[in-house]
Image: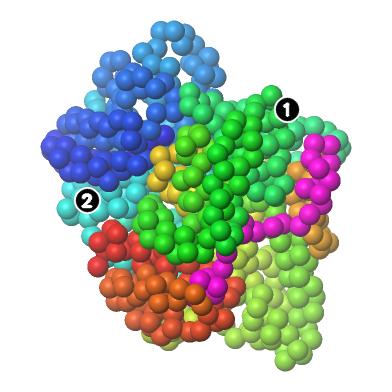
Amino acid sequence: MCGIAGIFRRRGPAEDSEIVTTMTGRLERRGPDGQGVEHDGAVTLGNRRLAILDLSDAGRQPMRSRDGRWLVTFNGEIYNYRDLCDELGVDRKSLRSTGDTEVLLLAWERWGPEALQRMVGQWAFAMVDTRESRLWLARDRFGEKPLYFHRGPDALAFASTLRALLAVPWVPRELDPAALAEFVTLRYVVSPRTVLAGIEKLPGGHLLEADADGARVRRWYEPRFRRTASRRRSDLVEEFGARLERATKRCLVSDVPVALLLSDGIDSRSIESTLSSLDQAVTSFTFRLSGKVTHPAPANGDEVELVVTPEERVEKMEPAFASLTEPVGDGASLATWFLIRHARQSATVFLCGHGGDEVLGGYRLSQDRFRLSALRTLAWLPKAWLDPIAERYLHGPEPPGARLDALRRTPRRKVPATARYLIHRPLPTADVEQLADAAPAPPGLAIVDELYAQCSEGAADLDRIQEVLLRTFLSENILSFADSVAMDSSAELRMPFLDRDLVEFALSLPPSGRVSRWPGRANTKQILRWWGREHLPREAVSRRKRTFNFGNLPELLRSHGSRVRGYVLDSSAVRKALPGVEAWVDHPPEFFRSTREGTLWALLALGIWCENAEVR
C-alpha cells in the first residue's frame, strides 16, 4: 500500500526527478516506510511505501523486472498473488521478494493488460515498458485506490492525490465551474472529471495507455447484472457463504496486524462472523457520539468503542478534510477518520463492510422501488395531487408536472432513469441556482442521465439502479473518502464485499435474490439475510438499515456556527466559483436538513481542502 506519482514525456527523454520527488513528498502519510524515484528515458516514477507485504528492502519501489525492461510503481494489494505465481509456473523461492509487486511485474510481462482480469484486490499502478517507451496506468474494478492525471501537450503527469499532482509546475490549480455544479448537486464528482479544471481521474475498471502518439483510455471491467438459470435458494446460500469466506480470507493476507471496523449493521457483522469461523481473532473498533470522551485500550479479539464529542468534531474537521485525496461531502468521512486514527495504534490493515449495500442491494431499495412503481401507476391522477410527491422523488430541473408526464410514458424497467434515481437526494435546482448565482442552474444531473443511458436495454429496474449506484455513490463517495481517511493514518482498508468472485456471484443473482418487490425494513440484501439466519443473531438479520451515526450539521451550526461557516467562506476559490455561497450558508441551522446538509458537508470539505491545497 503506497502513494505513487510520475511524469511521462511524449517527445522523448527528460529528467523530472526533482519534480517527482516533490510530488512524493506530498504523499508521505500514504507511505511512511520508504521512498524511491526512478528515471528511465521518457519516464520518471516515484513511490512512497507503506509496508504491508514483505517488510524488507526487497519490496522497495519503484521496482524493475530482472531484465530491466519493465518498471512499476504500485499502490495496493493483490490478494491472490500466490495463486498468480502458480498460474505463471513460478517457484516463489526463486523470487527476489515475498510480496505482490514482483508478481505483478511477472504477470504483466507474461499477459500484459490481460493480467488485470486475473488479479483480485485493490490497486492503482503505473507500468512502463522502457524498451518501447510506453506507459500504462491501471485502476482496480471499482476504484478502491485513487489515480489522477493531467494531459499536457508534451507530458502526462499522474499521482495518487490531487494535491501531489498540483506539485507539477504546469498543472493548473483552479476549480472547474462545470464540475462544481455536479459537486454541489451530488456531493461528489463522477469520473473522469474532478473539481479541478484540467485534471482527470482514471475511472475504476479503466486502463490508460500512453506513448509518443498520445494517451488513450479504455474500460477493462464493467459490472453488469445478468440473467442465469434458476437455482434453489439453499444452493445460492451455500455458494454465497463459500465466496464470502474466501473473500474474507483473502483480505487477511498481511505481514502486519489486521483489525475490523464494526458497525451494528449486517455487513460488518457478517465479516465478524466469518472471521470467527476462520478462527481469526481480531480487534474490532466502532464509533459513537457522546458528551464526554473515552478511549479504552484495545486487546486482541476485543470490541473497542471510540467516543467523540461535538467539540472534537469541529476541531478536527480541518485536518480530516484537508487530507482528502479529493473533496467529497459525507459526514461519515469525519467519523471514519477519527476511528482509524484511534485504531491505528493496534493495526495497520482494517477490514470493513463497504460495498455490501451497493453489490447486494441495500439501503432503502425495497421502499424506493415500490414507491417509484406506485408513483408511475398513479401518475394519471390530477397533477395538483401529485406535484409535491413528484418534487421529492422525481429529480431534475423540469417542473413537477413535466416529470410526471415523462414517468407516465416510461416502461417499468426504465422508471429509475426517468426519476433520475439516486440513493441520496440531489440538491434542488433552486439551491444550485442560488449557489452559482445563475439561472437556469448549471446541469448538475447530466451525468446521471448519461449513466442510466449506458445500462443494457433489457436490464431490470433494480439492475439499472445498482449499476448506477456502483459507479456513483460507491466509487466516487464511499471509496474515495475511505481510502483518504485510512491513508492519512498510514493504514489500509480492505473490503471483502468487493472481492472479484463475490461480486460476480452477486451479478448473477435475480432481483428477488437481492431486493424484495415489497417494502419492508428487512427486505434488502436478501441473499445476505438468508445466509445470516444461520450465522448471525436474529436482531442483526431483521433490523432495518442504520446509517453511520456521525452526528448532524444543524446541531454543530447552533453551537459552533461561526467556525463551521468560516471553513467554507474563508476559501477564496469557493467564493469565486460559487458567488452565491455566502447567502446560502447564512441560512438558519434548521434549513440544513436532508440533501442540504449533505451539500453543506461537501462545501466544508471543499473549502478546507482548497485552502490546504492552495487552490485559489
Residue at 32%, 53% in the rendered image: 162
Residue at 31%, 63% in the rendered image: 610
| Quarter that holds the C terminus | bottom left
Q: Position of residue 408 (x, y in %)?
A: 72, 77
Q: Position of residue 258 (x, y in %)?
A: 54, 31
Q: Which mark is residue 167?
A: 2
**Residue type, numbered disc 1:** Ser
Residue at 79%, 86% in the rendered image: 381
Q: Residues within 10 Å of mark 1 (few under 14, many from 20)?
A: few
Q: Earlier in the sequence, mark 1 or mark 2?
A: 2
For disc 1, the marked residue is 277
Q: Residues within 10 Å of mark 2 (few under 14, many from 20)?
A: many
Quadrant position of residue 422: bottom right
Secondary structure of the magenta portion, mostly?
Answer: loop
Q: Position of residue 592 (x, y in %)?
A: 54, 77
| Helix, strand or loop under label 1 | helix
